Image (spheres, helix red, strand yellow):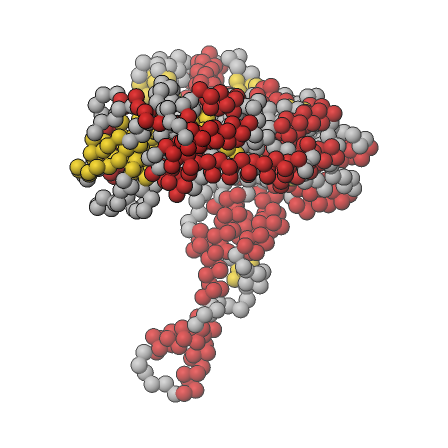
Amino acid sequence: MGSSAIQIPSRLPLLLTNEGVLLPGSSMRISVETWRNIQLVKSRLLKGTSVRSTIIGVIPNTKDPDSDSQELPHLHRIGTAGIAVQIVGSNWPKPHYTLLITGLCRFHIVEVLKEKPYPVAEVEQLDRLEQYTNGIGELSELSQQFYKYAIQLVEMLDMSVPVVAKLRHLLDSLPKETLPDILASIIRTSTNEKLQILDAVGLEERFKKTIPLLVRQIEGLKLLQKTQKSKPNDEKRVVTIRSIRRNNQIPGRPLHLDAVEEEDDDDDGDDIVMLEKKIKSTNMPEQAMKVCIKEIKRLKKMPQSMPEFALTRNYLELMVELPWNKSTTDRLDLRAARVLLDSDHYAMQKLKQRVLEYLAVRQLKNNLKGPILCFVGPPGVGKTSVGRSIAKTLGREFYRIALGGVCDQSDIRGHRRTYVGSMPGRIVNGLKTVGVNNPVFLLDEIDKLGKSLQGDPAAALLEVLDPEQNHSFTDHYLNVSFDLSQVLFIATANTTATIPPALLDRMELIQVPGYIQEEKIEIAHRHLIPKQLELHGLTPQQIQIPQEATEDIISRYTREAGVRSLERKIGAICRAVAVKVAEGQHGVTKSSRSHVTEKEGKESVPEETKDESITDTTELALPPELPIVIDRRALKDILGAPIYEMEVSQRLSQPGVAIGLAWTPLGGEIMFVEASRMEGEGQLTLTGQLGDVMKESAHLAISWLRSNAKKYHLTNAAGSFDLLDNTDIHLHFPAGAVTKDGPSAGVTIVTCLASLFSGHLVRSDVAMTGEITLRGLVLPVGGIKDKVLAAHRASLKRVILPKRNEKDLDEIPANMREDLDFVTAFCLDDVLNAAFDGGFPAESRHSILNSKL
């Protein structure tokens, strides 16, 4: 279809663009950002009837790029009428549109009719080509010459590319008069050259201006082909058409060919050759080598403009960087390892012993698989830092992976390479970072993994932490197996309750309980105080924290299983002393003289007396030359009043109160249980944020006491052995904001209620733990060492434990066992006899009743 069949309106809205020149028969994307063009799009293209039925005029605005000015810029007199075949809008970072416009024909501006809000002009259509259809003479020769060059240009391209073959077919099917505009939009030309072609209204002039451009493009391709012939075959690049878009909106219009890529990057070719050499020199497994060779062959045949080129190259570079067979040699000196562990960490005997066992077996058998250790304990006891010390002891690289809050399995296994932005998981990325295949991996906070729509990362860790499977761990990104059997995995957790059983089964649990007071004092003076002095720029000559002050900080200002709060308190003391030291280094003479003046007022003093008073006052005003010693008075001034005062004896001054022991992820805690009774209908009220297990324990306790009321002579307020007869009982666990649950409060509830109904006080220095049955048996519970530590911190003297937990007392340090009196109970009779002074007061009451009778 020729241009003569196109009829444009006599009035056209004008779109001003400085992004290029639109020629008839080609398409171009135009950004619409100026206020005039935006008004045109909103008024003409986004409103009314069909967008594609609206013809607009595109004017190149090359002389005045500032199109946001109020005045209309100078307009090029010849433009191209076109149709917007696509409109894309966006509001970020500011409102703008992108138009895909296909050119129809040229027009000439006769008169500008309106300038605001967008220009509208009266136009005259050009490109009336009927007179040239049967042209003869010079025009016919120019047409044939142009056609010959156009065929030559296309045949120099790769005909196996479908778009190039399509272009060759169109050269024969399109009218000769349309070819100059179409090919001028394909080949590389400057803006001024396209403007000259746009201004060439006559077909003869258009042929003359376009033929030199074709010849120049052909010569460039010939030069490129000569360069390629001199290169090896594996470095040749096929010249391709960058992008071809078909104009489907206007029947009969030709294809638009944006640009021809003819660049060849020598550096990329050299990099691929170097990458291939690295792959062949890397001692990777046979399966991985096959995959890499296959990918490098694909990479050689792939055009660099394809997005997959960069993805494949990144994949191959990762495969080269992975430590398939690189490892460090373990230091297998047990004595040196023992000394290093003892110097880095105080206490933790069980944990250190396990590391030494691993070293000993490794020394006897060199190919031992790395164990999967899991340190379980409260925060602040040194689980993470001991992992770093283990790596230092073994002479291995250390890598920490924080798992807290991870809820995507791709963080562990990686993403498949079909996804945009895919990357390997944290395990493979850690191996790449450390550069060896036998590091120490610390999986921190493994109990705080999440679960989401992206999968379960805890399930993805099953293969990583299984000693029988991790020799062939497959990351989704690599898609080949990697041997993790030599990696020493150490996981840390505060509790095992939130770790899935299948994952827990793959790890060797090592309990890391809290520290006793003596251990905290040693840790403070060995590690914490020197560290804080260095951090605050102080020296032992400026500050001294004696052991008595450390004991006060531990017992009266911190109540924790670890030492984090203790370190913060020591840091607060160091900051306060740093202020005193810094003040003493500035303005000594001036401050001392002003002090003397304030003290003595306006009295006249002899000269010698002034000097003496100044000297004496200076010594008083400055910090003392001796180290600042921290005592109890200084602690109160710096840290404030003590936070934890022992209130146990005050709380147990009335019947119906007992002390239990509870385990939390933060360590052991003492727990008060209070009970009261009142007239009512026999209801049992429980308060204090209790879970289902603890509620069941309370019901078990009241049922056991009711069934044994006559045996122990327990009565309600009316003297009846039916404890709930016209009586309501309220059981309360203080600190109601803290959720409490677990099978360890049964004996405490029984003791509390027995005290309430008997009217006798529970010993104020007794704490207890254990679960009960309906028949009065005491069942074993967990967390014994943490609970005993809590009782010791609270200065209690007697701890009642289940008989079957007697074996756990071996873990209690000897000095603590000397301070505490442990009573093991088989049934509730044993518990009650140990909880009250002189045994449970059933016998005395029985004799009183007999005497009355």
Q: Nearer the viewer, residue 440 or 411?
A: 411
With respect to residue 753, does 426 lie above or below? below
Query: What residue do we see at 37% from left, 40% from top?
Result: 196
Point out residue 124 in the picture as x, y percentages from the top left corner. 24, 32
Query: What residue do we see at 64% from left, 33% from top?
Result: 236
Q: Nearer the viewer, residue 726 or 111?
A: 111
Q: Is residue 261 visible?
A: yes
**Is the C terminus in the top left, top right, bottom left or bottom right quadrant?**
top left
Q: Is residue 685 visible?
A: no
Q: Residue furthest left?
A: 113
Q: Quadrant of residue 428?
A: top right
Q: Quadrant of residue 250?
A: top left
Query: What residue do we see at 51% from left, 37% from top?
Result: 215
Point out residue 672 in the picture as x, y percentages from the top left corner. 45, 30
Q: Is residue 628 left or right of residue 125?
A: right
Q: Quadrant of residue 686?
A: top left
Point out residue 803 in the picture as x, y percentages from the top left corner. 61, 22
With respect to residue 801, does 69 lie above or below? below
Q: Nearer the viewer, residue 182 or 120?
A: 182
Q: Residue furthest right?
A: 364
